[in-house]
Amino acid sequence: MKTGKDLDNQALLRFEKAAEDLGARFERFYPKDVHRIPEYDAVLIRADTHAMNMTYTVARLAESEGIPVLDEPDSIATCGNKIHMGRLMERHAVPTPPTLYLLKADAQSIEPERLFEELGSPLVLKAPTSAFSAYVEKVSTPEEFKKESKRFLRLTDGLVVQAFMPTTYDWRVGVLDGRILYVARYHMPKGAWRVYDKEEGSGQKKWGRVEAVPLGEAPKDLLKVAKQGTAAIGNSLYGCDIKQSGDSFYVIEVNDNPTIYPGYEDSRAPHLYEDIVRHLLEGGIG
């Protein structure tokens, strides 16, 4: 079975070929090479991004040098904080599941019963900086809420409390500078409610199946909501996670630096790598 590291490496090889086909030279660099950023004409970050790690430093340095970079630093910072992201969604009238954003003091003092009355049951709790389904839990009673929120608040200054929308898959829409790059369904493992979770009858977590969808077959309203959700963040490279209920679509979150694996997200988007490289070579201008 291929690991994430294997797939990341294969994707980098495809980015390299795309760059060479477009007349550019592709070179890998690592944290020890940060001082060389000003030597490059464009920077593509393919590592876990966070405002508190080296990827943000790389993005900020590239931006300060006027070098096109994906992802750019403001998107890294915004997508790394679900409360800030949620506020932007509200401001731009992006359809989302009913959600409350609580700072630590509010989360500690609020009566859980009120949350269940307002948002229904069960609820989904998220830490503002959660990723890969870590610190994302479903709770069905006030007692469960108190237990999980107390655990979360040991590590975070707030909580995202969201109405639960049961689905067998999440939509993932890749967007670059307002243009749709790819569409996929991220299926849940059997019996699970998250795309990375324990499969029914197993104690081991696994990723659900990824099913790429041709752009021409994707619902138009899905693409419209994905563009709306990503535009609220910026004009960089994003993976927009969306739930579907009937004919309606709701943004769950927007991810900067989204997963792009050969045979998965790219399988119905043959020009995906070229599109990203060309965007950088053209100066990152849409």
Image (cartoon, rainbow, N blue to C red):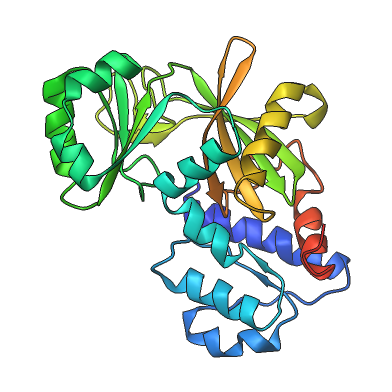
Residue 251 lies, in percent from the top left, at 55, 31
Residue 42's image quarter?
A: bottom right
Residue drawn 13% across the image and 31% down it: 146
Residue 49 shown left or right of residue 136 in the figure: right
Residue 261 visible within the image: no
Residue 149 in the image: above or below residue 95: below
- For the C terminus, give its image quadrant: bottom right
Q: Residue placed at 47% from the left, 50% from the top?
A: 3
**Residue 75 appears at what percent x and percent y?**
56, 58
Say which of 25 and 69 sits in front.
69
20 with respect to 57 (left or right): right
Q: Is residue 117 above or below residue 129?
A: above
Residue at horizontal 77 percent and vertical 40 percent from the top: 269
Give the x, y percent position of residue 176. Answer: 72, 50
* Residue at point 71%, 77% (across, down): 67
Would you place residue 72 above or below residue 61 in this image?
above
